[in-house]
Amino acid sequence: MPLVDLKVVVPGYAEAIERQDLVRDVAFLGVPETLCGIEVAPMTFRHILWLQLIRSPFIGAGLPKADTLHLDVAAFFKTLAPLGKPSFALTVFDRKLKADLKRYTEAVGKLKASDER
């Protein structure tokens, strides 16, 4: 039975492979991404380990709770801060944290408003 080149037979397969390779490779370049209007570093295995250590609900440590959601979000964004290192010294009085949370809240508000339309 002859071998079939799926890139030739399946429409769009070659382009999908190129996109997949690009997305995977970009994580190793350290190029910042934007998430909810906040600049973050591409998530690496190290970030996943940090988030697991702090029991982040965004990495499978249960569902976020309403009373600690702002801290969970802050810890997530601080962990993925570009060229930054995870910090356990998170406080709600940190000006940068407040600015990040404000942008996050605004982004969530926009998403909710677009869902209601």
Image (tube, rainbow, N blue to C red):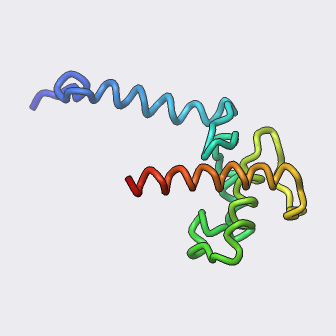
Q: Residue at x 68, y 43 (%)?
A: 38
Q: Answer left or right for 59 relative to 20.
A: right
Residue 40, percent from left and from top: 69, 42
Question: Does 81 sit above or below residue 90?
Answer: above
Residue 85, percent from left and from top: 83, 49
Q: Answer left or right for 61 relative to 10.
A: right
Question: Does 114 sit above or below residue 66?
Answer: above
Residue 55, percent from left and from top: 69, 71
Question: Does 7 sit above or below residue 47?
Answer: above
Viewer-closest of 80 and 15: 80
Q: Residue at x 35, y 31 (%)?
A: 16
Viewer-closest of 40 and 66: 66
Viewer-closest of 37 and 19: 37
In the figure, residue 66 lies in which quadrant?
A: bottom right
Q: Answer left or right for 32 relative to 21.
A: right
In the figure, residue 28 lies in which quadrant?
A: top right
**Can you name the residue that lies furthest to the top here?**
8
Q: Residue at x 57, y 76 (%)?
A: 62
Q: Which image quarter is the N terminus in?
A: top left
Residue 9, percent from left and from top: 16, 26
Q: Answer left or right for 64 relative to 116.
A: right
**Can you name the residue that lies furthest to the left here?**
1
The mark total stands at: 0
Q: Residue at x 56, y 75 (%)?
A: 63
